[in-house]
């Protein structure tokens, strides 16, 4: 594999990013999980990142803002990140975006599926995000990069990185994934999968 930190590689990650969706960060459940609602202010289309624990509350937050959920974006398939996918799909018909290397874990959830392959651009109304393949915490760990921020799941937290000792974890891959994230523009805001740091972002 080519070193992900090569300049040409970094440039490809950030070049031509679509305009960023607006973000709502919501803490759910008892494990300090963060979900994000990403939305297009013009069309009111929305994506929910890692719907879990309080799907009903997430949907109410969307409803209160007149948002229509079109996608579920999955950073990885540990239960505390996907526990609400079923309900979300059932109630909204959202398309599930997940790494093909972890899609198996969501075989039971209905609805359409999109493979979150590296650098795939996903439209959320007139805004959008780009999938970045970032394994290490899990085999198919995926970050979602927008113009100005990145959603990192359990790859990167505020002040630390995710564990690599669960099944599918790999320390060398985690290192490469972190190098890749580190190469993003300095001002990039991190939205992690858990509220483990001194600040939420
Ligand atoms: Zn995890």
Image (cartoon, grey):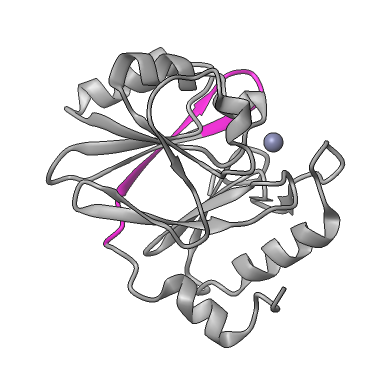
Residue lying furthest left: 42
Quadrant in the picture for the N terminus: bottom right
Q: Is residue 15 left or right of residue 44?
A: right
Residue 174 covered by magenta stretch: no
Q: Pinpoint residue 138: horizontal percent, then vertical percent.
A: 72, 43
Near-viewer residue (113 or 146) = 113
Q: Report the number of numbered marks.
A: 0
Residue 22 covered by magenta stretch: yes
Q: Pinpoint residue 182: horizontal percent, then vertical percent.
A: 63, 70
Q: Is residue 30 above or below residue 194?
A: above
Near-viewer residue (150 or 12) = 12
Q: Is residue 29 above or below residue 96?
A: above
Q: Residue at x 48, y 65 (%)?
A: 188
Q: Residue at x 49, y 19 (%)?
A: 109
Q: What is the magenta range?
A: 19-34
Q: Residue at x 77, y 59 (%)?
A: 173
Q: Residue at x 26, y 61 (%)?
A: 19
Q: Is residue 126 left or right of residue 81?
A: left
Ligand 1: image quarter? top right
Q: Is residue 106 left or right of residue 120?
A: right
Q: Is residue 141 above or below residue 2?
A: above
Q: Pinpoint residue 123: horizontal percent, then vertical percent.
A: 28, 50
Q: Is residue 90 visible?
A: yes
Near-viewer residue (20 or 177) = 177
């Amino acid at each position: 594999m080519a070193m992900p930190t090569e300049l040409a590689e970094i440039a490809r990650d950030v070049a031509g990013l679509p305009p960023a969706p607006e973000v709502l960060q919501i803490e759910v459940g008892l494990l300090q999980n963060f979900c994000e609602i990403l939305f297009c202010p013009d069309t009111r289309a929305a994506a929910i990142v890692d719907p879990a624990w309080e799907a009903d509350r997430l949907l109410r937050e969307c409803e209160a803002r007149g948002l229509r959920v079109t996608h579920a974006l999955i950073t990885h398939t540990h239960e505390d990140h996907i526990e609400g996918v079923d309900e979300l799909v059932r109630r909204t018909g959202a398309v599930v975006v997940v790494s093909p290397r972890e899609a198996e874990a969501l075989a039971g959830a209905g609805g359409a599926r999109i493979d979150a392959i590296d650098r795939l651009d996903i439209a959320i109304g007139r805004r959008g995000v780009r999938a970045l393949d970032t394994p290490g915490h899990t085999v198919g760990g995926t970050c979602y990069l927008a113009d100005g921020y990145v959603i990192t799941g359990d790859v990167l937290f505020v002040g630390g990185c995710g564990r690599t000792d669960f099944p599918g974890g790999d320390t060398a891959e985690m290192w490469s994934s972190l190098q890749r994230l580190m190469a993003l523009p300095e001002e990039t805001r991190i939205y992690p999968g858990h509220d483990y740091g001194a600040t939420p972002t």
